[in-house]
Image (spheres, grey):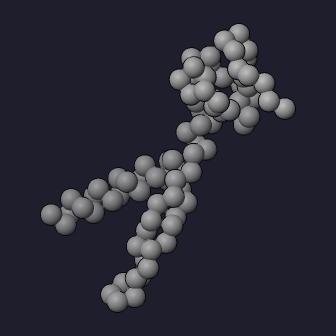
């Protein structure tokens, strides 16, 4: 069942059932999770090079936002040590 969101309507997070702040809905229309849950829910597909030497292939790793942030940090560290 679909209903249009208006300013007075209260949306509840589909994960924890907490009220989503109206400001958040204003910024992200159609959002279904609160701030706490949304940071854990987005999934990122990250191409990762596997193997070594002549035998390499690219794998798509599905990460949570949290894992992705850590991966980015690791990636930056590696780039820094190369230089
Ligand atoms: Zn929530």
Q: Quadrant of the N terminus?
A: top right
Q: Is residue 66 visible?
A: yes
**Left or right of residue 39, residue 52 in this image:** left
Write down the quadrant of residue 26 in the picture: top right
Instruction: Kindly tell me whether residue 16 is visible in this rendering.
Output: no
At 44% from the left and 74% from the top, the residue drawn is: 58
Of 1 and 68, nearer the camera is 1
Seen at 40% across and 88% down, the residue is 55
Placement of 47 over or under 16, stated as above or below: below
| Number of numbered markers | 0
Where's residue 34, x and y in %?
63, 29
User: Looking at the image, which residue sits at the far bottom?
Assistant: 54
Q: Position of residue 78 (x, y in %)?
A: 27, 63
Instruction: Residue at the far left: name it.
Output: 83
* Residue for point 51% across, 58% down: 45
- Check the image and report above or below for 12 versus 64: above
Q: Residue at x 69, y 15 (%)?
A: 6
**In the orientation shown, which residue stands out farthest toward the top?**
8
**Quadrant of the image for the C terminus?**
bottom left
- Does 48 sit left or right of 75 as displayed? right
Q: Between residues 1 and 52, which one lies in front from this camera angle?
A: 1
53 lies above or below 26: below
Residue 50 in percent (x, y) is at: 43, 77
Q: Quadrant of residue 53?
A: bottom left
Res. 42 image quadrant:
top right
Q: Could you tell me residue 19's position as x and y percent?
A: 70, 21
């Amino acid at each position: 069942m679909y209903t249009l969101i208006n300013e007075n309507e209260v949306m509840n997070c589909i994960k924890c059932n907490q009220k989503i702040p109206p400001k958040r809905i204003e910024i992200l229309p159609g959002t279904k999770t609160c701030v706490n849950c949304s940071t854990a829910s987005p999934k990122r597909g990250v191409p990762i090079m596997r193997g070594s030497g002549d035998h390499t292939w690219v794998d798509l790793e599905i990460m949570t936002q949290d894992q992705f942030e850590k991966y980015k940090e690791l990636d930056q560290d590696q780039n820094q040590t190369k230089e």
